[in-house]
Image (spheres, rainbow, N blue to C red):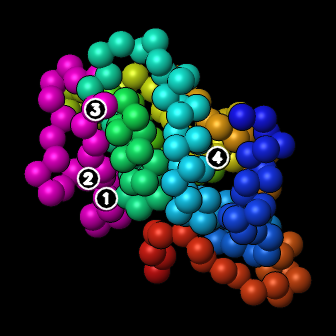
Amino acid sequence: MERKEAFRIFEETGALQNGHFLLSSGLHSPQYFQCSLVLQYQEYLEKFCSEIREFYYDEEDISLVIAPAVGGIVVGQELARQMGVRFIFAEREDNHMVLRRGFRIEPHEKILIAEDVITTGGSLKEIIKIVEDANGYPAGIGVIVDRSDEEVEFDIPLFSTIQVKSVTYSPNRCPLCEQKIPLTKPGSRNFK
């Protein structure tokens, strides 16, 4: 899919939002990608996930897709469906990603990691650690929107359907705060 087409879909569904947002990373941004507004439409969910599947098509023996809750669940479930493999998700418990609900990773299992949006990559790094601690093999990462910068490295392949340069600010150096623009927290992670 062309970048222009992907942005058109995000704009038409209201998923590309402008304002003053508190990201899951704790950073502030004037732009937010609310992937759930795009992924509620099955045709877009299938379209974006099929691009990820195509990228990893030659990667043999992937038997599991894992995603962080909440945003990555829809992406991971659809990606696993398209690949014909098992799907599990990790969720936050005491501020750390963990496997619950009886989910397991088998030793040496080859795993694809799925996510909706990444900025700092913190949740994905936690998922990679969960996979490696269980002696699984993280084969790659598939994400809908990559708004990270060049400093985020995973040491495994990363494919995104959309890559954008993120504009983020530290909360103590945010020009949007200085302008007294109301801060909105649209993500799923709770902050204290």
Q: Secondary structure at mark 1?
A: strand
How much space separates mark 1 and mark 3, taking CA atoms? 20 Å
In this view, the mark in front (3 or 4): 3
Q: Secondary structure at mark 2?
A: strand
What's the magenta region?
84-110
Residue 39 is one of the magenta-drawn residues: no
Q: Quadrant of residue 172?
A: bottom right
Up/down of 187 relative to 155, above or below: below
Q: Quadrant of residue 177?
A: bottom right
In this view, the mark in front (1 or 3): 3
Residue 64 image label: none
Coordinates of residue 150 in the picture (x, y in percent):
71, 34
Q: Which residue is mark 3?
A: 85
Residue 98 image label: 2
Amino acid at the residue labelled 1: Glu
Q: Are marks 3 and 4 in contact (CB under 8 Å)?
A: no
- Label 1 Cα crowd, 10 Å radius (few <14 / some 14-19 / many 20+): some
Amino acid at the residue labelled 4: Val
Which is more N-terminal, label 4 or label 1?
1
